Structure formats: structure tokens, C-alpha cells
Image (cartoon, coloured by chain):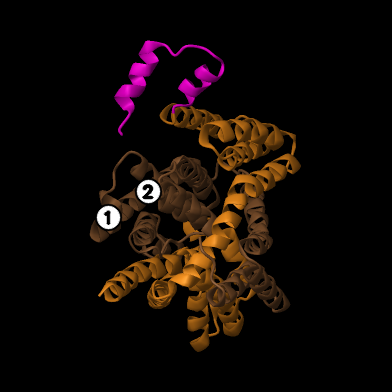
Amino acid sequence: MEDITEEKRAKSFWFADWAFPLIVGIMSAAIFTGTYMYIQYGVGAFNEVAIVAMLKAGLDGGSYGAAAAFGASFLFARILEGSLVGILDLGGSILTGLGIGIPAILLSVGITAPLNNFPLALLTGGILGLLIGGIIVLIRKFTINQSSSTFGADIMMGAGNSSGRFLGPLIVLSAAQASIPIGIGATVGALIFYKFEKPIAGGAILGAMVLGAIFPVAV
Amino acid sequence: MEFVTILIKSLIIGGLLGFSAGVGAARMFHAPNTQALGAFRTLGEMNACQGDAASHFSFGLGFFFNAWASAVGAGAFTQDVTHRVVPNWAAAALLYKNKDVSQTIQDPKKMGIAGTIIGMIVVAFLNSTAAAIPEALQVTAVAVLVPAATILIDTVMPIIFWLAAIDAGRRTGFWGTLFGGFAQMIMGNAVPGVVLGILIGKGVDDQGWSRITRIILFAAILLFILSGFFRGFDLELLESFKLSVPDWLDNVHEIIKTE
């Protein structure tokens, strides 16, 4: 890529600023529709269990407040940060903000159509993504070369990563409370994954499920 | 029939996702000159296994199993699908034929094409296998995952973010504590407040009270006021302090209320 000149690069779709809203739009269409899939078929949300669980709390008849506030503030923070540092964080902005926060806001005010209809979900996600991408390119025009701050992105990412580490042990604890066989399965699964240097949350879930299939629990 | 519907929808979603994840990841290597879509951890991890197809592949594979377990158990893919599996597998596929990173994983066009194919396969696989899982397994997963996730969101995450804000400096600690406490009361979870506190505190640390940091603070306060109003926090607040709610405020809430 080094042999490509700056002018050529600015004109090319693959590097241009104007292409950015399109890329975000395509990504957002996919993520928003993933949330549609989760609501319709119970599978397909593109986020961590913990974050999807917030949306689930609203779907199950509770409040959408946590999902809406969490998602919206993440989106807000990431839009600012993304335009300043040059990398829009997918996880906070699109996966959490647009995939969880915006659906939660829509559902809490009674707008269900975009989350009940496949083409409409794609379209809604795409348009919202275009807007987000557009806002970032605009902010970029005004702030680039003006700021050297990352606004604590590293601190938030560090905290995000370390809270992810808690999920493994929490799953084992929660499995042990579900039933003894499931607790044994989760512990052994976590140990196997740990031995092979994989995230222990995955092993704990799989182990719990294997033993849970043989000795089912009633919920 | 439902299986076929899920499969077709998944192929469409996966293709779109894979394309944008591939292009966004390749553009990261040209940031900040080119606005990219991805994550710093993705960039760091891709740099760590740069040039080695096997490293990229096995790195993605570990997270693929994790995503699979999560999708089967709770219907959630984990963020790793977009952050790790698609970018690293697209990289591995391209590097298999050409070892020059500047012509492969740093090229948005090639990464976009490879990502499209991988995204389609990964999403279709995750959705269709998870939907075909027997109910006993899903019941177990829900019984285990939901309590664990609840503790994580309600207690562990707020504390971790809060401690990170306190450790990051006096200013982030101050704003994190202020907004964290209010976020817990207004939004029901302290994390968004602490995140905003870090954003403001660190922004001021790095560049002082500039126009940008003032706008951020103003927007954060606005966010709190609006979400407080829409969640009826103002009414609850007055009632908790044994004060009567003025009629006009009640009326405003009646007008806004949608249910």
C-alpha cells in the first residue's frame, strides 16, 4: 500500500472519508438485524451475554431503562472518541449502542415495527448507521489535528476487558448454585479451558451444558 | 421451514457484517489518516500475529468456540465475532496465498471480500446450529448464564469501572464518582455514568477546559436530565423527599407518556 499516493488514496472508495458512513451503514444494518434475529428466533445478537441480558430484561416485561441508557451513553462516548482517534470502536458504538441501546429505546416507546420485520430491520439499521458514520466524518472535519486526547479510551477498554474476566468465575459460581452435576460440569470445563489457555467462561458454559443435558434442572 | 428462513437471513446478515468488518479492520492500519471501524484491541492483536496465517487462524478459532458456546447457550454471539473471528480469519485466508501484509490484511478491498465470505459462513453456522440445540441444553445455559450475567452487570462492572476511574487520576475519580452515583439512581446502572466521568476527566487532564471538553460535559448533563425526565426520576425524587408533585409537572409527564 505504501506505493499508493495520497491523492489516489483520497479518491479511492476503500480509503475515502465519504466511504466511511457507507461502511458503518452496512455494519449497522447487519448488527441491528442481528438484534431482530435475537428477538424473533432467540439467537443472533452480536454482543456479550451480559449486555444482551439487559435487553432481555426489557423483553421479558421488565424495564428497558438499563439497556437504553447503557447503550445510548456508550454510543455517545464512542462517536466522540472515534472521530478523535481515527478508529470508531465497533463494540461500544455499533454492537452496544446501535444493537442494544437503540432497539431498547425504540421498544420502550412502543415502536416495534423495525424489530418485527426483516427488510425493515436492515433498512432501519442501515439508515441509523449512515447517520452515525456521517456525524463522525463531520466531527472529524472540525476536530482533527486539534486534539491529542483519547478521552480515557484506554482506561475504559482496560476496565471493559478486566470485567470480562469476571464472567468465567461467576459462571462457575452460578452453575454450582443451579445443581451439583452442573456445578461439577462447569468446574471441570473451566479447568480444561484454563489448561489449554482459552477463556474459562467458554469451558464453564460448555461443561455445565454437557452435565445439564444428562441431569436436567427444572427452571 | 424456519431453519431455511434463519439460514437465508443469516447469510445476508453475515455477508454485510463480514464485508464491513473486513474493510473497517484493514482501514485501521491506515488510521488516523483514514477513519476506520474496529477496535484498538483488534488492531493490537492483529499486529501481534501479523504475517503468520496460522497465528491469525488459531487466534480466531479460540474465540470462535467461545462465541459458539455463548450463541448456543444464550443466543448472544459475543463481540468477538466482529472483533476477532472475522478479521483474523479473513487475514489468515489472505495470508495463505500471499505473505505480504501490505498487499493483504492492510488492503481494505481484499479484506472486505474475504470478510464477506467468512462472515456469511460464521453467522449462518452460529445461528443454525444454535437454533437446532435441544431445549434441555438451553434451559441449563439460561439457568447458569442469567444469574452470572446479572451479577456481572449489577455489581462487578460498576465496581471495576469505578475503581479504574479512581485509579486513573483525581479528576476521573471525581467525575466518575459523581456521574456514577447519579447514573445508578437515574439509569439503574452506574457504568454509563462512570464511563462519561472518565471521558470528561481524562479529556480535561489532557487538554484542559477546551471547547470540546465543555461540549462533552454539557452533553453529559443533558443526557442525565433527559433520561431522568423520561424515566420519571423527577417525580420519584420529589416523592422520596415527601414533597408534593406540582400539577404542571404531572401534566407534562402525562403528555409525554406513550403507554
| Most foreground residue, A8 or A141 | A141
Q: Residue at x 38, y 42 (%)?
A: A105
Q: Which residue is mark 2?
A: A103
Q: Quadrant of residue B227?
A: top left
Q: Secondary structure at mark 1?
A: loop
A207 and B154: which is toward the camera: A207
Q: Is residue B146 above or below residue B235?
A: below
Q: What residue sits right under mark 1 in the picture?
A: A116
- Residue B128 located within the stretch drawn in magenta: no
Indicate whether residue B251 is drawn in magenta.
yes
Element class at badge 2: helix
* Chain drawn orange in the picture: B
Bounds of the magenta span? B232-259
In terms of image quadrants, where is residue B112?
Answer: bottom left
State the image coordinates of residue A79 (x, y, percent, origin top left): 48, 46
* Chain of residue at mark 1: A
**Circle 2 chain:** A
Q: Mark 2 against mark 1, which lies toward the viewer?
A: 1
Q: Position of residue B118 (x, y in %)?
A: 42, 77
Three-letter amino acid code of the residue under disc 1: Asn
Q: Mainly helix, strand or loop, the magenta region?
A: helix
- How far from the left and from the top, in percent, is residue A8? 40, 65
Mark 2 in CB contact with mark 1 (< 8 angstroms): no
Q: In this structure image, what is the colour of chain A? A: brown
Crowd rating for badge 2 (residues with CA inside 10 Å; few <14, some 14–19, many 20+): many
Asked if one can make out residue B133 in the rendered structure from this viewpoint, the answer is: yes
> Are discs 2 and 1 located on one and the same chain?
yes
Q: Where is A157 relative to A139, above or below?
A: below
* Amino acid type for the residue under numbered disc 2: Pro
